[in-house]
Amino acid sequence: MLSGWDQEVHNLKTNIMTSIKSYRDLLVWQKAIQISVEVYKITKMFPSEELFGLTNQIRRASNSISLNIAEGYGRHTTKSYVNYLVTSRATLYEVESGMFLAKELELTTESAIQKLKVLLEEESKMLASLIKSLTNKIH
């Protein structure tokens, strides 16, 4: 039996255009939404003086992950879609780095960001697999 993200990759490789009717059907997009929700929960606890600083930056970055997946899905070429997925992965690293900084600044704790860390790791693997799969279709 395949894990969640392995199953997603398998499904994408075999049924990319037949079973996926919308970006909303993609587990990679659904997990990106979960990441944003988790980021909002965590940053809600940040001090108010960070509202226009790190809080805003991390929230915008977390939102960009799913937004880029959706926008790329709507593009006319696979190559363009891959570019948006690469941007999503880079933005995921921005969220991860921002959370690391928040922990170092003692705006949050390791235990508070544990669930987010798991989601980010899973999303990173899913994006890498999807990028690889689609890149192989191009070449």
Image: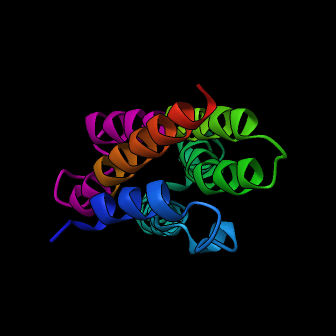
Q: Is residue 1 above or below residue 118?
A: below
Give the percent coordinates (x, y) of residue 12: 48, 58
In this view, the residue in front, 48 or 82, is 82
Residue 109 falls left or right of residue 27: left
Q: Is residue 63 above or below residue 84?
A: below
Image quarter in which the C terminus is found: top right
Q: Which of the 4 image quadrants contains residue 70?
A: bottom right
Residue 50 falls left or right of residue 108: right
Q: Residue furthest top?
A: 139
Image quarter in which the N terminus is found: bottom left
Q: Is residue 136 above or below residue 16?
A: above
Residue 128 visible here: yes
Residue at 28 percent of width and 58 percent of height: 6
Give the percent coordinates (x, y) of residue 124: 38, 43
Please check the rendered image and state whether residue 103 is part of the magenta-colored stretch, yes or no. Answer: yes
Residue at 16 percent of width and 59 percent of height: 111
Q: Which residues are magenta?
A: 92-118
Residue at 82 percent of width and 47 percent of height: 75
